[in-house]
Image (cartoon, rainbow, N blue to C red):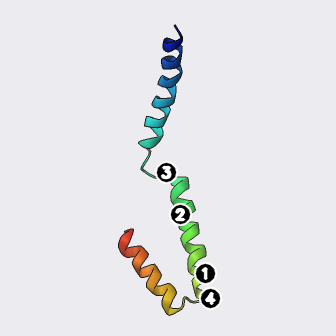
Amino acid sequence: MARWLEFARLVPLVGALAVFAGCESQGPAEQVGENLDNAAQDVGDALDPAGPAEEAGEAIDETLNP
């Protein structure tokens, strides 16, 4: 009986993990948030431009994480 209860507790957890793992598409709120983040980054870059080392690091990041 104890094994059945352990199994019964794991089923909802595994199901929830499967649902959240499948959420790859962005909703409208996530897109707006990403746009705001990008705009804030652009303003910060305009106020304090990146130096050569930072630009090289950003280029590496963009290459490795498209």
Q: Hey, which residue is sitting farthest top in the picture?
A: 1
Disc sitting over residue 34 in the figure: 2
Front position among marks 1 and 4: 4
Q: Residue at x 57, y 84 (%)?
A: 45
Spatial CA span between label 1 and label 3: 25 Å
Q: Name the side, left or right, on which 11 lies relative to 33.
A: left
Along the polypeptide, which appears first: circle 1 or circle 4?
1
Q: Is residue 33 above or below residue 61?
A: above
Along the polypeptide, which appears first: circle 4 or circle 2?
2
Q: Amino acid at mark 3?
A: Gly
Spatial CA span between label 3 and label 4: 32 Å
Q: Amino acid at mark 1?
A: Val
Q: Are marks 3 and 4 in contact (CB under 8 Å)?
A: no
Q: Are marks 1 and 4 in contact (CB under 8 Å)?
A: no
Q: Residue at x 49, y 92 (%)?
A: 52
Residue beneath label 1, please? 43
Q: Amino acid at mark 4?
A: Asp
Along the polypeptide, which appears first: circle 2 or circle 1?
2
Q: Secondary structure at mark 4?
A: loop
Front position among marks 4 and 2: 4
Disc sitting over residue 27 in the figure: 3
Spatial CA span between label 2 and label 3: 11 Å
Along the polypeptide, which appears first: circle 1 or circle 3?
3
